[in-house]
Amino acid sequence: MDEPIRDISRSPTKLTVETDILGVIGERLRTCCGAMSASSVVVVTDHQVGELYAERVLDSLRGAGFVVGEFRIDVGEASKSLEVAASIYQYLAVRELDRDGVIVALGGGVVSDLAGFVAATWMRGVRFAICPTTVEACVDAAIGGKTAVNIPAAKNLVGAFHQPILVAIDPSCLLTLSPRDVRSGLAESVKHGVVLDPSFLDWHEQHVEAIVRLDSATLTELIRWNIRLKSGIVLEDAEERLDRRILLNFGHTIGHAIEACSGSTLRHGECVSLGMVAVCRLSCSLGLLAVADAQRVESILSRFELPTRLADSIESDRIMAAIRKDKKVRGGVPRLVLLERIGRPVVRGDVPEEAIREAYESLLP
Ligand SMILES: NC(=O)c1ccc[n+]([C@@H]2O[C@H](COP(=O)([O-])OP(=O)(O)OC[C@H]3O[C@@H](n4cnc5c(N)ncnc54)[C@H](O)[C@@H]3O)[C@@H](O)[C@H]2O)c1
Ligand SMILES: [Zn+2]
């Protein structure tokens, strides 16, 4: 018999920011599943987040009548791999998670990218929900439906668009993050201000102290503002076919290359911070951006103690080779998001390689 047609990829995502939502995640997920019943849920998390929050989530899911399983991955970017995805598929097979099942990601961007990729591909796609627990994931990775794993050739090269049915953000989870992970995630928030909303960048400058102190009301405002900005772009260009969603790649072409060459010594957000500094300087050298605007971006990143120069040198030849492998390269030419002024990005596919190299080299110690 034919299966009823259902289009899970286009169902709207319910996004909610609520303190202590993890304790009621079961009923929230039940509501989101609506008429399409679900009985089985598999929670994917990493060992660190699992220790802190898995029990609360699993208890709530059981309380709402779900049959639950849990899969823990090792902490860190290396887990975003096809090998780890395969071990999750194996677990789903043993648990017989069928097409009515739901996969819940509990963790940072590594967990949500990986679990989302598994959800997009398991039985050609099952429903997916995210409980993001890092700043990075709350302000960026959990919004927009991009999922991916890395392969040795490059980061995020294998992936799918798969929108979650629910993103449940509990800002109080961020209190257990290391200060380094808090700062790292803030790079993406600054990015949203620089590229999409000058008033949001002003707001960062005015609230540095409350943000780094993780003041609850300030954090909630920061997360909500990021959600508004990013989902606005995603709604216009969900699958990055226009020149809208690519704007969110600001700082990422050089940033990803640094990340790939740094051997996992730097966090994603730290690399994005370095990438933003380089691309602002590049925009200045091409005569697009005023030096004062570039300096302002650098100064905000410094106030959040994000890196604006490399601590350890990486040869520019290696960086240029990594840039050529970037997904945004078309016909061998990288498409870069540059800046004309704060809030006015521009996509250019004609930037000379030497200019990119020079901008990168300005970060060297
Ligand atoms: N899909 C997207 O649109 C998108 C956007 C931005 C970033 N990303 C991806 O996100 C990844 C980076 O995400 P990340 O920075 O969240 O890294 P991460 O998931 O590795 O988390 C960082 C560290 O924090 C720990 N942790 C997580 N939550 C915690 C908590 N509440 N308390 C204590 N420790 C906690 C983790 O165990 C880990 O050690 C990268 O792979 C990047 O490519 C994806
Ligand atoms: Zn990023």
Image (spheres, rainbow, N blue to C red):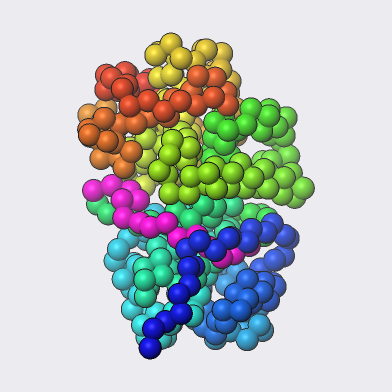
Taking the spot 37% from the left edge, 35% from the top edge, the residue there is: 253
Q: Is residue 40 above or below residue 328?
A: below
The total of numbered circles placed on residues is 0
The front one of 177 and 230 is 230
Judged left or right of residue 144, residue 258 is left
Q: Position of residue 53 (x, y in %)?
A: 60, 69
Q: Indicate the quadrant where residue 25 lies.
A: bottom right
Q: Residue lying at the far bottom in this picture: please name it.
A: 1
Question: Can residue 101 be seen here?
Answer: yes
The magenta region covers: 153-169
The front one of 175 and 321 is 321
Judged left or right of residue 28, residue 364 is left
* Residue 127 forms part of the magenta stretch: no
Q: Position of residue 1 (x, y in %)?
A: 38, 88
Taking the spot 37% from the left edge, 75% from the top edge, the residue there is: 123
Question: Can residue 136 be seen here?
Answer: no
Secondary structure predominantly adopted by residues drawn in magenta = strand
Quarter that holds the C terminus: top left
Q: Position of residue 361 (x, y in %)?
A: 33, 22
The front one of 304 and 12 is 12
Taking the spot 32% from the left edge, 21% from the top edge, the residue there is: 351
Taking the spot 57% from the left edge, 72% from the top edge, the residue there is: 54
Q: Is residue 198 above or below residue 214?
A: above
Q: Residue lying at the far right in this picture: please name it.
A: 217
Q: Indicate the quadrant where residue 170 lies.
A: bottom right
